[in-house]
């Protein structure tokens, strides 16, 4: 069984919400990325969303864009990320989902990218700029490799596209909680609960909500209505704050910061 499926299955049996932190690969170094992921695993994170740095991100706000720029400035290479995942797999079995631009997947080749990612120890991918209607080949290659392609839905997604997305998504469905780009928000939209209920009526696939979640209270709110809570910018901002530290010390700081969010998501 794919690690993503197994983790959500185990959580469902315990009636527990998944906590999914987002970090950027190579920010501020790949050594730091490896240390952060292993420390987050030990703190109780359930799935890692790992951003592949890209010069023209689709929906990311200034915090994550800056993290991509830092990683690219270090001479980011895709194969370096795959090597880092192999290192992580020596210590951790936490599910890892790549967030990667369609242009990267296309340039490498669907088969080659997914096969290399799977061999490295990545369990699936979110591809935010890939229309599901045009992605049959990607889904087919993913299925062949037991590599989950996670789809997105937003408050503005039409009912017709919701039907397509809920039928296609694998592993879990990523619900974009706000209209706009990534980044911390003072409050979450009033319609988040109702929108997630509508999605749950369409699919048995777990639904994880992200965009805008940055506090214990927000994580607790989302954790009561979704199957997973995704936090990105708040964590990436902390990485930026501590970027001058040695890799192990950065990881310790991030794990301590994230522990409160994990507790919120899980209602503790």
Image (cartoon, rainbow, N blue to C red):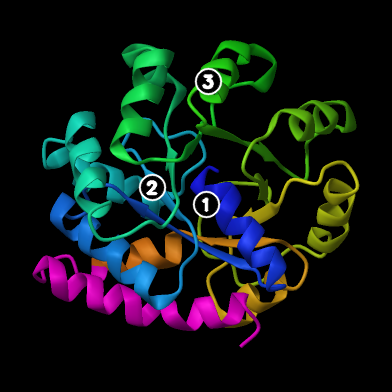
Q: On screen, 137 above or below 95?
A: above
Q: Kindly identify the residue that appears in the image at 23 percent across and 30 percent down.
A: 78
Disc 3 crowd rating (10 Å Cα; few below 14, some 14-19, many 20+) is few
Disc 1 crowd rating (10 Å Cα; few below 14, some 14-19, many 20+) is many
Cα distance between the residues tagged 1 and 3 = 32 Å
- Quadrant where the N terminus is found in the figure: top right
Q: Is residue 89 left or right of residue 56?
A: left
Q: Position of residue 67 (x, y in %)?
A: 29, 50
Residue 253 is inside the magenta segment: yes
Residue found farthest to the bottom: 268
Cα distance between the residues tagged 1 and 2 = 15 Å
Q: Position of residue 87 (x, y in %)?
A: 19, 50
Q: Secondary structure at mark 1?
A: loop
Q: Secondary structure at mark 2?
A: strand
Q: Secondary structure at mark 3?
A: helix
The answer to whether residue 55 is seen in the rendering is no
Determine which residue is flagged by label 1: 182
Compare residues 81 and 238 and report the one nearer the observer.
Answer: 81
Q: On screen, 26 above or below 189?
A: above
Mark number displayed over residue 43 = none
Please give the range of residues in magenta.
Answer: 241-268
Determine which residue is flagged by label 3: 144
Q: Is residue 138 left or right of residue 69?
A: right
Q: Earlier in the sequence, mark 1 or mark 2?
A: 2
Task: Please state which of the two labelled residues, at mark 3 or mark 2, is closer to the viewer.
Answer: 3
- Quadrant where the C terminus is found in the figure: bottom right
Q: Earlier in the sequence, mark 1 or mark 3?
A: 3
Compare residues 158 and 32 and report the one nearer the observer.
Answer: 32
């Amino acid at each position: 069984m794919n690690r993503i499926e197994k983790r959500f299955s185990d959580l469902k049996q315990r009636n527990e919400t998944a906590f999914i932190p987002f970090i950027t690969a190579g920010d501020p170094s790949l050594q730091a990325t490896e240390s952060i992921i292993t420390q987050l695993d030990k703190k109780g994170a359930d799935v890692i969303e790992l951003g592949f740095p890209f010069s023209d991100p689709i929906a990311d706000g200034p915090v994550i864009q800056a993290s991509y720029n830092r990683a690219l400035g270090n001479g980011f290479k895709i194969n370096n990320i795959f090597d880092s995942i192999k290192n992580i797999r020596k210590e951790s079995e936490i599910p890892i989902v790549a967030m990667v631009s369609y242009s990267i997947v296309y340039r490498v080749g669907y088969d080659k990218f997914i096969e290399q990612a799977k061999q490295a120890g990545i369990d699936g991918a979110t591809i935010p700029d890939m229309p599901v209607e045009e992605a049959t080949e990607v889904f087919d290659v993913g299925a062949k490799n037991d590599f989950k392609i996670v789809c997105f839905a937003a408050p503005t997604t039409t009912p017709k596209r919701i039907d397509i997305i809920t039928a296609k998504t694998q592993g879990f469905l990523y619900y974009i909680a706000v209209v706009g780009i990534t980044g911390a928000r003072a409050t979450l939209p009033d319609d988040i609960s109702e929108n997630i209920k509508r999605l749950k009526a369409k699919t048995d696939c777990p639904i994880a909500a992200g965009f805008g979640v940055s506090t214990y209270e927000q994580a607790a709110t989302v954790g009561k209505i979704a199957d997973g809570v995704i936090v990105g910018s708040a964590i990436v901002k902390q990485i930026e704050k501590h970027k001058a530290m040695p890799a192990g010390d950065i990881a310790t700081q991030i794990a301590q910061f994230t522990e409160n969010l994990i507790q919120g998501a899980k209602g503790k």
